[in-house]
Amino acid sequence: MDFLTKAISYLKVNEERFLEELKEICTIPSVSTSPAHETDMLKTAETLAAHMRRIGLSNVQVIATQRHPVVYGESLAGKPGQPVVLVYGHYDVQPAEPLELWRTPAFEPTLRGDELVARGASDMKGQVMASLNAVEALLQNGPLPVNVKFMIEGEEEIGSPSLPKFLRDHKELLACDVVFNPDAGMISPECPTIVYGLRGLAYFELRVSGPEHDLHSGVFGGVVHNPAQALCELVAGMHDAEGRITLPGFYDSVAALDSAEREEMASLPVDEAYYQKQAGVPALWGEAGFSAVERVGGRPSLDVNGIYSGFTGSGSKTVIPAAAMAKISMRLVPNQRPDEVYEQFIAYLEKKAPPTIRWELIPMPGGPACMVSRDLPAVTALEQALKTVWQQPVCYKREGGSVPVVTEMQEILNVESVLTGFGLPDDQIHGPNERLHLPTWRRGTEALVHFFINMGQS
């Protein structure tokens, strides 16, 4: 039995243990945005470090940052000249709220048919464990065919604010030939996917205030400009009738999609009905003149992620609220930068906000869009691995989400990334009842065994 066959056999023999280990890591509520979960963040990092040591990685460290620690481990027993692959991942997760919409508790992993339901199961503890399981299978059956390093951070879901300094401070430790990043996803269970473009992110909190305190709506209604009303008016004006964003100069830096790329996007198995079904909406909406896949992968967007004001309890309370707040995110495309978008947002508010209110715009961590070369040897190695396991052509796709670390690694470590992942569009990441399709996850783990072997041969 050759090395590859032994490693694949090892995966199948240990399927149930791998699932139990994934469940264990998903029980820890590693919510990076909440100070209440500081202890859980450290516990998750230490659990991952212990797992790395158990499977045979060396130089395993839990490295402190300004906020949440980074977990590092390596296997550098390969021959001189073998490439070094740095595997990136994150162990933090989004908050589970609203808890009442979960069919089972968010941090009590539950099997439902072929799916594991838990916060973080898909994004991205399942992807981290798939990478570790593949390396374990190789280490247990012979010398690793490629040098591997793991860097698993705890701040991706809050914009990775500590990561740039960490990368600069540990450039020698993280030196590599390519980064493997499984924080993307697949188009469908039968369509293995490599992502070559990611939108950037600009995130803001817009606060609007009016009276010094809540007012009686009978006494002051029609006299005082309601901050909640003013906020809604400002938000409504951020798009025109064609779905275009109205911030001054917003599209000045947007890189246009050329005809060849639009043709390739049109060939993907993701038509309008695909997005409508995945979202569960009666109809799609967006910028006129572009298809859904073009809007998601190649055009910028602006969305309200949350809005709050006044009385929201049961029953009635007739008040004019003193303040209102909205969380607003923008997904950016190549050539757009968060600092420029901030200035455009300020210009919009200065022009549109009425003198009857006060406003404050608070920027939060984000990052620019990135494009990855499709000519990298690692991309070829991954494409061959995916085709071997799925027996299907690989789809190349620009993704709508943001992974700021990709750009930061390009700029700080001077290294490119290859992106994939084994989550699916209907995994409900960031929402209630997040889930991981286990057959796809297991096929993905097998593909990673092939990938690392391919990299060793490259």
Image (cartoon, grey):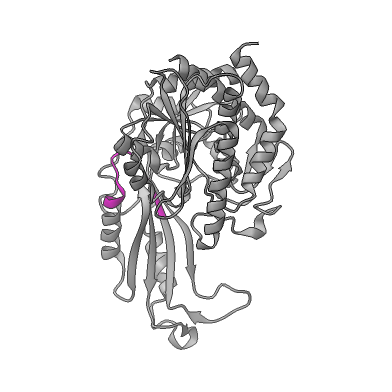
Pinpoint residue 63: horizontal percent, then vertical percent: 44, 46
Residue toward you, 47 or 310: 47
Residue at 35% across / 40% down in the picture? 170
Quarter of the picture holding the N terminus: top right
Pinpoint residue 241: horizontal percent, then vertical percent: 39, 52
**Left or right, 305 with reference to 300:** right
Q: Is residue 358 above or below residue 129?
A: below
Q: Inspect the magenta stretch and tell me whether residue 330 lies in it.
A: yes
Q: In the figure, residue 355 lies in which quadrant?
A: bottom left
**Residue 242 visible (yes or no):** no
**Left or right, 242 with reference to 247:** right
**Left or right, 385 with reference to 363:** right
**Residue 362 visible (yes or no):** yes
Residue toward you, 303 or 19: 19
Quarter of the picture holding the C terminus: top left
**Residue range corresponding to the magenta coloring:** 329-340
Pinpoint residue 289: horizontal percent, then vertical percent: 39, 38
Outermost residue to the bottom:
219
Pinpoint residue 129: horizontal percent, then vertical percent: 58, 36
Outermost residue to the top:
1
Residue toward you, 120 or 238: 120
Q: In the figure, residue 276 lies in which quadrant?
A: top right
Q: Is residue 190 above or below residue 365?
A: above
Q: Is residue 346 above or below residue 11?
A: below
Q: Inspect the magenta stretch and tell me whether residue 157 lies in it.
A: no
Residue at 40% across / 19% down in the picture? 377
Residue at 37% across / 26% down in the picture? 177
